[in-house]
Image (tube, helix red, strand yellow):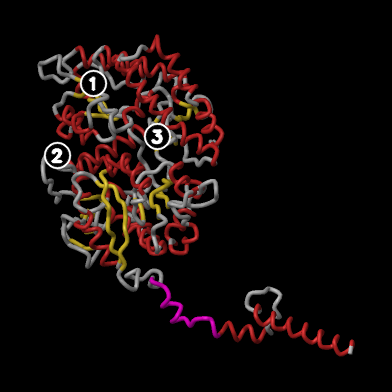
Amino acid sequence: MKKLLALLLAMLLVMTVFAGCADTTEESSDAPESSAADKESEKEEEKPTDDEAEDDSILNPAGTYPLVKEPVTMTMTLLVGPKDNAPEDMWFFQYYEELTGIHWDVTAILKDDWGEKKPIMLATAEYTDVFWGTSWTTGEIYKNGMEGTFIDLAPYYDYTPNYVREMDAIDGSWSYVTTPDGKNYSLASVAPVNWYSTSTGQINQKWLENVDMEVPTTIDEFYEVLKAFKEQDANGNGDPNDEIPLSGYYTDSTEMRGILLRMFGLLTDGSYTVNGNIALDPNSDRDAVFVPFHERYKEYLVFMNKLMSEGLVDADLFTQDQSQYFAKGAEYRVGTIMTNYSHYVDIDHLDHYVLLPVGYNADEERVVTQGSPIGFGKFVVTDICETPEIALSWIDIFYLPEHAFDILYGPIITKDANGNVTYVSAGITEDPLVASLISLDADGVYIGFDNSTWEPESDEWTLWDWYCRNHPGNGAFQSTISEGYYLNLLFPTRPTTAEDQYQTQLARYERADPTDNSNRGEGWWRWQNIKHNYDLIQFGYPTVYLNDEQQTFMDENSTIINDYVMQMEAKFITGAASIDGEFDGFIEELKKLGAEEYEKIYQDVYVK
């Protein structure tokens, strides 16, 4: 009986075990394995055919158009200018919808409003699938990536072969888009060809002749010239009191501030935000420094306050906007222009101006800067985007020269010396108000743009406004590959050295009809820039990403620190605060606000 009972229990146990195995075979890693033959058979049954796999993708094979098998609608945020057409009316978006099969519902934001609207869009989660050409700090990129608002794009690089190719061609490029967590939350712009510096300001040579002085090269000489402009009838109109020796604006731009700080030997763009108030000191092995802590910052304030108190700089510096500033320049009242393009300020007297790189003294090199060849944050995909692969396949075509050209210039039309016209972008459009006309010589060699067909809608329109009317240049120009680079790829006969480019732009300026402000203005600025600035160019503080602890500090303190600098700087320059009596207190307050830690963080992450 005992043996029978034992046998029954054993059989029951075996049956229970097998029943358990039968219930858990698909879930348990301890389940018996099938034979290799069985496995291969199962794989073949599960594996879709090529046709089935292709049907699962919403994209057509790479390199074919349209990009998608069925029309797709996505959403985009794009910066625009006040004179741009609505995006839905731009030739650019209409054409690329037809080409790619992708329609973009565009939220257009004026460039001047972006700083105000950006945090609101993020805080309310009322944003679009992508942001194109919008500006971000590295901290914003990293923070929004860590929080999941911006997605990591690296897993989608199979859809961006053109972008990857261009990035791989420049050493160190990936560091500009790689955050401390190893992710890539944005695509970058790539600019391997650039002959031009950032602005150094321009001075009126005719005024210099009228006061019998030379172009200044040092701060002391610059002061003496401004003083002569003020005290004598520099513009020659018989009224010695209507000249403004130096003008510009601080209200919505840091361009003038950057120009002036560079005169004092600080390698900076003048920004209060992106790497705000961090400069490199070329006289101390390019050390990174917080601008107000540098000994020459106080000298800069004293100099500017002196100009203000003596009436040598525009009294409206901190209240006027760009349009008010341009209006004064158009009246021929401004002797020194503190913006990149004097032909936008005073086109009627273009020949009177010359670029003005001024140095601290005769013993130091003048400081002229150029932007980085890699620009981060140019294209961002958000967490609400359901098809990142489509968004990235779309932007990737603009890393090809023929499409990068269209972002500002539209399709290409060429005209040779005999007047023969070729529509290089055949089948797109032959409208000269949308396309760009390129002049070739008798041998078919590239000469340059022929903008004689442009039609300003008013006296206030510039060539830039005209281009951007039908193209998203205000937000997206050079957001993929740079102008000089894609023009060289499209036109192999185009100048490929600074010297050749110098001669080409000089010829462009000299060849242009006196009434052709577009070609004369662009040719003048580019020729002058290479002539006076090219050999002086240096790169400023690079793009850096901070770790979580550093970024937390910046999020809590950066705006407070830099806003305080901005407010006190205006007071010191205008005389509302005494430099002698209050500067030391200003520095102490900055230290209380955390400026020493702020500086140290940027010094710690900076790699020379």
Q: Residue furthest right?
A: 2
- Left or right: residue 227 compared with residue 514: right
Q: Tag 1 or tag 2, which sits nearer the N-term?
A: 1
Q: Residue 356 location in percent, x, y? A: 31, 27
Residue 114: image x %, image y %? 31, 42
Label 3: few (<14), some (14–19) or many (≥20) C-alpha neighbours in 10 Å: some
**Nearest to viewer (mark 3 / mark 2):** 3
Mark 1 element type: loop
Mark 1 neighbour class, 10 Å CA radius: few under 14, some 14 to 19, many 20 or more:
some
Q: Nearer the viewer, residue 121 or 199?
A: 121
Q: Residue at x 40, y 40 (%)?
A: 371
Badge 3 element: loop
User: What label sits on residue 460 in the rendered view?
Assistant: 2
Question: In this picture, which residue range is highlighted in magenta?
Answer: 45-58
- Asked if the residue under mark 2 is in contact with the one under mark 3, i.e. CB atoms within 8 Å, the reply is no
Which image quadrant is residue 328 in? top left
Q: CA distance from mark 3 to mark 2?
A: 30 Å
What is the number of the mark on residue 273?
A: 3
